[in-house]
Image (tube, rainbow, N blue to C red):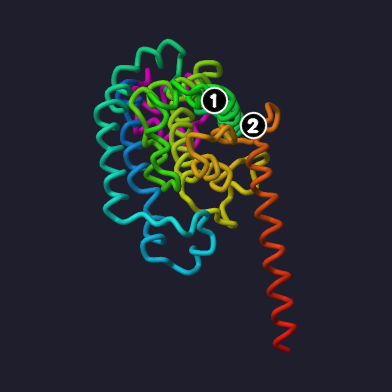
Amino acid sequence: MLPYATISDAELFLGRTLTTLERLWFDYSKDKSDYFLYCHNILFLFLIFSLAPLPLLFAELSRISGFERHKIQPKVRLSLQEMLRCYWDVLRMFFLVIGPLQLVSYPSIKFIEIRTGLPLPSAWEVLIQLVVYFVIEDYTNYWIHRFLHCKWGYEKIHSVHHEFTAPIGFAAPYAHWAEVLILGIPSFLGPAIVPGHMITFWLWIALRQIEAIETHSGYDLPWTPTKYIPFYGGAEYHDYHHYVGGQSQSNFASVFTYCDFIYGTDKGYQYHKKVLGKLKDEQLRTGERNSEKLD
């Protein structure tokens, strides 16, 4: 809750006029507790998980031609019933694990001093902090993910997530309850090390969920903005990890590719791409020879 009764009080304290965004934030948050603002994450997660996967799921069910050629595993098709089963399973996990965890984890947010007051962070501050959060999460997630692919970790926990060998957006958070809890640690580390504003925290949680949905979408879309992010893995990169399944010792990184490159866990994927490239070139040459014979 803001310590100012009016905008004038806030401007007097800051020694300047509030920006438009700061005025909007003041009007919205002035009479709301910090705990209430923190709990917005529950709503954001629910809406993003429920809505973000829908366009590509509709495209898959409708077999829209513009999207079909970008489907990574075109021979694998899930029925509407299978998609809905995945959604309801994750929704149950959301209400039984993720939601309650959000409700009781507020003291940790206060401890690391995520602030809700004024001034709001600049766009550069938000951007830099988000980059730091992604890098920290990616590095930590990489090692936890590798641990979950050891014999015990995979059989007891991680195999649930790999039930979808050709993932869909709804399958991004589809996992054993223990994995949900464990992988919450990397997501929290960034804000704990570099604490920022509550708005930055909201953006971080939302963007991380959107990124996870994209990498599990099953479509390698050439026009996605993430294609321009250096070292970004994306859907094709992570889809290979699911395609190989429990035997996979490749592509453990959640967001970027640098960890797999540094520690040599992308070799299977690189070999796979090389073989596919040769097959495509051979098919292209065969097609050209056949067309020449017809001429």
The answer to whether the residues at label 1 and label 2 have Cβ atoms under 8 Å apart is yes
Residue plotted at (48% across, 46% down): 214
243 horizontally vs 135: left or right: left
In this rendering, is residue 46 above or below 84?
Answer: above
Crowd band around label 1 with a 10 angstrom C-alpha radius: few (<14), some (14–19), many (20+)? some
Is any atom of residue 15 visible in this view?
Answer: no
Q: Position of residue 80 (x, y in %)?
A: 29, 56
Q: Look at the image and say whether residue 53 sits in the magenta stretch.
A: no
Residue plotted at (38% across, 22% down): 181
Crowd band around label 2 with a 10 angstrom C-alpha radius: few (<14), some (14–19), many (20+)? many
Q: Estimate the spatial distance between the alpha carbons at disc 1 and disc 2, rounded to whole Å.
A: 10 Å
Q: Element type at marker 2?
A: loop
Kind of residue at badge 1: Arg
Q: Position of residue 176 (x, y in %)?
A: 35, 28
Q: Position of residue 61 (x, y in %)?
A: 36, 61
Kind of residue at badge 2: Thr
Q: Locate the N terminus by quadrant.
A: top left
Q: Which residue is mark 1?
A: 146
Q: Which residues are magenta?
A: 1-29
Q: Which residue is mark 2?
A: 265
Residue occupying the far bottom of the picture: 295
Whichever of callouts 1 and 2 sits on the residue coming sooner in the sequence is 1
Q: Element type at marker 1?
A: helix
287 horizontally vs 39: left or right: right
Is any atom of residue 241 visible in this view?
Answer: yes
The residue closer to the viewer here, 128 or 270, is: 270
Magenta span: chief secondary structure: helix
Q: Locate the C terminus by quadrant.
A: bottom right
